[in-house]
Structure formats: C-alpha cells, structure tokens
Amino acid sequence: MTDRRRCEDYKQVSGYVPVELAREFKSICAREGVSQSDALEEMIREWLGKKTASNSSQLEQANRLITIADVVRANMTKLKRCGVKNLQALAKGEVLPTPGDFAIIMSSLAIPEEEQKMIWQKTFSSLNNDFGGVNECERSESPKPTGLEL
C-alpha cells in the first residue's frame, strides 16, 4: 500500500464539517473497512464529475472514461473490494487487466455491454498507438488475451 503522506502523487485536503457528519462519516468508513482517504477521494471525484458535467455535454464526459485505466482510477474505492489485484498499476496504465479481471471490474460497476466493448477497444487501440501500431503479439511474449468476447 502506498504511504500517501510521503508520495508526491498525493496532496492533503482538509475542511470543516458539522460534528455529527464527521462522526457518521468515520463510523461508516470503519464499518465498511474503507479508509477515510479512499472515501474522500471517491466523493471528490464524484463531486468534480457532477460539476464538470454541468459545464460540458454528457458525450464529453463519457469520452474521458475511455480506457480501463480511466475507469479504475475513477472507481478505485468501489473496486478495492471486488478482488482484482494490481488496482494501482491498472489505474496508472502500467498493466492491463486479464480478461477475467476486466469482466469483474465491468460487472462490479454495472457497466453496460456496449460501453464495455468501447472501453476494451479504446484500451487496446491506445496501447497500439503507444507502440507505434505494433500488434500485441509482436511486443509481448504472452499471447493476446482471449476468452472475453466483447
């Protein structure tokens, strides 16, 4: 687990809320086994999403979440309990999900099949662009993932 206090990728945010709200927040985090930082990150992302959605069309917002890394990054707290390994690496785009992990992520987030297809295609087409169009079999010793028909 990342020590967020010492990591340059994280910054502390603070504010004041009513005492009862703070107690209820801490209680639910403890009961759910979720860190307060993870819960706050999820809530801030949702809040920002609402604010940016009011300033842009839904199509523009949908285009932001086009790869599996984008989806994992935006839903990290929800996905921590679904059993997928390497969520941090997936969120940073350092690794790709196995077809099974992809299915678990999509199912956990209740993403419709058409959107799943788009995310899968965008993830692997962006990968091809990053490698100058070299197909996956040529740049990796492992075979191309199979078994997930999208």
Image (spheres, helix red, strand yellow):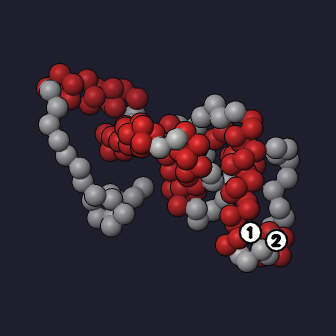
For the N terminus, the quadrant is bottom left
The residue labelled by disc 2 is 135
**Residue 22: mark in rendering:** none
The residue that appears at 34% across and 31% down in the rendered structure is 29
Image coordinates for residue 124, horizontal then vertical, percent: 73, 60
- Report crowding for label 2: few under 14, some 14 to 19, many 20 or more residues within 10 A (C-alpha): some
The residue that appears at 67% across and 72% down in the rendered structure is 130
Image coordinates for residue 26, horizontal then vertical, percent: 26, 30
**Residue 128: mark in rendering:** 1
Is there CB contact under 8 Å for labels 2 and 1?
Answer: yes
Helix, strand, or loop for circle 2?
Answer: loop
Residue 46 vs 66, above or below: the answer is above
Tag 2: amino acid: Asn
Residue 10 vs 150, above or below: the answer is below
The residue that appears at 58% across and 55% down in the rendered structure is 69
Taking depth in this image into account, of 130 and 61 the one nearest to the observer is 61
Relative side of 18 to 125, left or right: left
Relative side of 31 to 116, left or right: left
Helix, strand, or loop for circle 1?
Answer: helix
Relative side of 126 to 45, left or right: right
Image coordinates for residue 25, horizontal then vertical, percent: 28, 28
Q: CA distance from mark 2 to mark 1?
A: 6 Å
Relative side of 85 to 131, left or right: left
**Which of pointers 2 and 1 lies earlier in the amino acid sequence?**
1
Residue 26 vs 123, above or below: the answer is above
- Report crowding for label 1: few under 14, some 14 to 19, many 20 or more residues within 10 A (C-alpha): some
Task: Say if residue 76 shows up in the picture.
Answer: no
Task: Say if residue 90 shows up in the picture.
Answer: yes
Tag 1: amino acid: Asn
The residue that appears at 82% across and 44% down in the rendered structure is 150
